[in-house]
Image (tube, coloured by chain):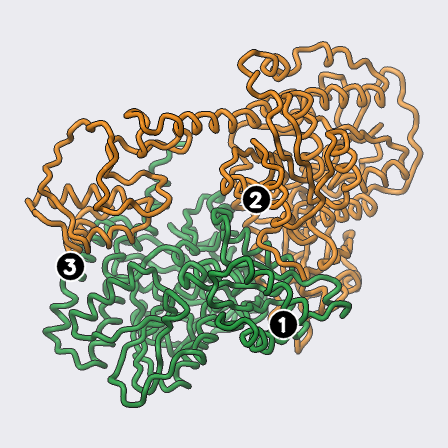
Chain colours: A green, B orange
Amino acid sequence: MNAPLIHQPPCGGIDLHQEQGQRAVFCGLTGIVWLHRKIQDAFFLVVGSRTCAHLIQSAAGVMIFAEPRFATAIIDERDLAGIADANEELDRVVTRLIERRPDIKLLFLVGSCPSEVIKLDLSRAAQRLSGRLAPVRVLNYSGSGIETTFTQGEDACLAALVPDLPREVETAAPSLLVVGALADVVEDQFLRIFAAMGIGDVRFLPARRADTMPAVGRNTRYLLAQPFLADTARALEERGARRLPAPFPLGAEGTTGWLRAAAEAFGVAEAVFDRATAPGRTRAETALAPHREKLAGKRVFFFPDSQLEVPLARFLARELGADLVEVGTPYLHRAHLAAEIELLPQGTRVTEGQSLDDQMDRCRAARPDLTVCGLGLANPLEAEGLSTKWSIELLFTPVQGYEQAGDLAELFVRPLRRRALLEV
Amino acid sequence: MQLTLWTYEGPPHIGAMRVATAMSGLHYVLHAPQGDTYADLLFTMIERRDARPPVTYTTFRAQDLGRDTAELFKEAVAAAHARFQPQAMIVGASCTAELIQDDPGGLAKALNLPIPVIPLELPAYQKKENWGASETFYRLVRALAGPPAPRPAREPGRRPLCNILGPTALGFRHRDDLIEIRRLLDSLGIAVNIVAPLGASPADLGRLGDADFNVVLYPETARSAAEYLKKSFGQPFTQTLPIGVGGTRRFVAEVAEIAGIDPAPVLDGPGSRLPWYSRSVDSTYLTAKRVFVFGDATHAIGIARVAARELGFTVVGLGTYSREFAREVRAEAAEHGIEALITDDYLDVEAAIRAAAPELVLGTQMERHVAKRLGIPCAVISAPVHVQDFPARYAPQMGFEGANVLFDTLVHPLMMGLEEHLLGMFREDPEFHDGVGPSHLGGKSFGTPADGALEAGERAPADTPPTSAPVPILLDRPVATAWSPEAEKELRKIPFFVRGKARSNTETFARERHLPLITIETLYDAKAHYGR
């Protein structure tokens, strides 16, 4: 706890610090909340403790979904004492589940901290159940908080899908794969832009349904749509796919850079690229202008949460003129974020990892105009007079691409506007 | 292994957090992986607390397991003590740390801190939240209440003095119940010594023994501690739940008897409006309404009594997820001539509700969902809590004002149900056409094309002719502006809660530019134009 800061040599012109201590981030199980909305015939069964069940239920405020496509198989004393055979128990629970939900085509067994610690082998269980429950496919991944933070749960889930993806024939023409869960509306916008650039074969991982997952092969070029997909990228590389290095499609600049990476890889002429992206760029500019007035010069502090912090900070600094006090991130993937780190203002303080109380001290001392943080910290900081933006909303809201650039900016403007409006 | 879609209670360390967060000057060091820090938001978001819970998590990771998680724990305890300077600390493990068996109590003791450090053993794979709260409170009281001493008789003329035990952070209406019960005790001439855990410090717990008796508001959290105080200090404690008019009157009588005073000033006072409202002729339709009650033991028992004896409902189902209080709930169910449902399996509760076919469900947020699916009116009467269960207004469940609140809470859903029923009956009438939802669900705008704020599903296909609605007052809306099928489809992808606005903005945008057809391009041009 409260380990001294280890000052790192400069990394692309930023002022990088690493910190260890108490973290205040969700575990990877939280990703289930958006993944189950994205893959519409998948069910997520956490094999864990009552804490896991309670986390998913309360953390995401998911009480709004009456019959969710996720559940927890709660490990109890009998499982731990070996009185019950954990595998038989799991089979029983899964059978009950599938009987209740015949619409399910893909079942994820999701490992948790307790299942990892007691070394419950979910990959064997998934294989066994896949055989028994065919045509329902059963896969597994770990969302445990000892191995994953928050968005890494999506990474683990997508990485689990990769070995199962159809094999693309060797002779196939190059295709483009967009990796990372995006809102359907955002996917469709990108599809239209790619079509206008003449890139017709564009696929998405994850697909919206289990039986439409994309084929992958040596001719697959992929663009990461999210910055937290290290394991998925590795698994795709193993299947022969190649990553197109790019910034992330947040804000107009990020979106243009992201699209340009595809354009260059697919040999799209500059004029065609310009024509395909010009309307979007213009609209993003129109939409961003009013927000720039409100965010220019505002001092922003990011607590580590989703790993989206670096691209978001880049967007706030470069497109909206905000000043970055500190950009916390749970983990900084040097390679995937290389283009982003390049774009951050010289000397931006980036903190990888966390020592919560120390970071809160720094935040209080800096008194930023806007603090981007997790749900546990937002109200306490508001009560101390700081304006906050809860970071989880940045994952649940469509924010990528030109058409959402204004919406993304507005998410940051709203807390400031609200504070200005309230007289009491 | 138990298949769980929803849980009624969190793990036991959440109960310990509810106690720690309720108190001041106490700090909890929890040996737990980082994911367990989600618990903070229960307090900061659901209860809207203005400070982080006084909890330090060790947030160990897989890489620490190979090394020394015990050392990590000790560092966390020492750092928390240095930073927060609490009067006392509690230490323990969450479910994962329980498996690695680091012995938080022993490790903390080895640090020789100059304050009481109380170890908690909360078996995460056997026990649950309320048990954890009860055990934590009991351990704190045991450690901090001081050496057992017999109660000296009260000197003549001194006001009787009591403690109020049970209210915690994240409790269902605990905040307001406490105000109400304090008011009742004050009218009886009884002074309050300590309220705990809510608002008490470790030092305050050292003064619990000064009171003549204890008022136990929530046996789920306070009965063990009250039994300990009875044994150690000879303090009797109350058994009656002050829920409903009858419950409150019995509570007043019991308290007065324990305190040796006259209950008449309160019992003869104005009391609650419930009895008259219930006798008022407009309430006749409530007679023998079939209700299903499910919740924690305190609320399930209390509300079942109110439903049957004070509102004239028929209780057709009664159950609890508080296994520790199964006996009490079974006894209450027997009074209603039914068998109690003791389960923490949401699917069992759903099946029981379906089978009982009630006209009203009084339950938790989970039963609210079941009721919604079955089309039955419902009111929430118990934890697990939701942000809605922390209303800004004063809304106790206990005491006479609590009875007033219960009358409204239990009767309003039925009135809403009645309205819905009428709407169904008159559905074909022009004033009640299909587009009009029940008024309590938020109005749909007048005229069919706009999307309502609470639109649940997809809009009717465009080729369906509009229902025989009355012709809306004609707004300045030339028919010429049409939506291309692609644009219409795109519009439906926009989240429903902003779709109505997107539609009207786009139409205005197109009209102003004399565009005959709205395309996807128009939609996004308009979006960019209006920004926010």
> What's the CA distance linking mark 1 and mark 2?
30 Å
The location of residue B217, given as percent across then percent down, is 73, 32
Image position, residue B270 (x, y; %):
65, 11
Placement of A314 over or under A300, stated as above or below:
below
Image quadrant in which you'd find residue A35: bottom left
Q: State the CA–CA distance, disc 3 to disc 2.
A: 47 Å
Q: Position of residue B509 (x, y in %)?
A: 13, 44
**Residue located beneath label 1 in the image:** A116
Q: Is residue A317 visible?
A: no
Q: Is residue B139 left or right of residue B390?
A: right
Farthest residue to the left: give it.
Answer: B514
Secondary structure beneath label 3: helix
Toward the viewer: B469 or A185? Answer: B469
Q: Secondary structure at mark 2?
A: helix
Q: Which mark is residue A282?
A: 3
Question: Which residue corresponds to mark 2?
Answer: B366
B62 or B485: nearer the viewer: B485
Amino acid found under the numbered disc labelled 2: Met
Residue lying farthest to the bottom in this orientation: A170
Left/right placement of residue A31 relative to residue A92 reads left
Circles 3, 2 touching at the beta carbon (< 8 Å): no
Name the residue type under label 1.
Glu
Q: Chain of mark 2?
A: B
> Considering depth in this image, is B327 or A144 the residue closer to the camera?
B327
User: In which quadrant is the C terminus of chain A drawn?
Assistant: top left
Quadrant of the image occupied by residue B142: top right
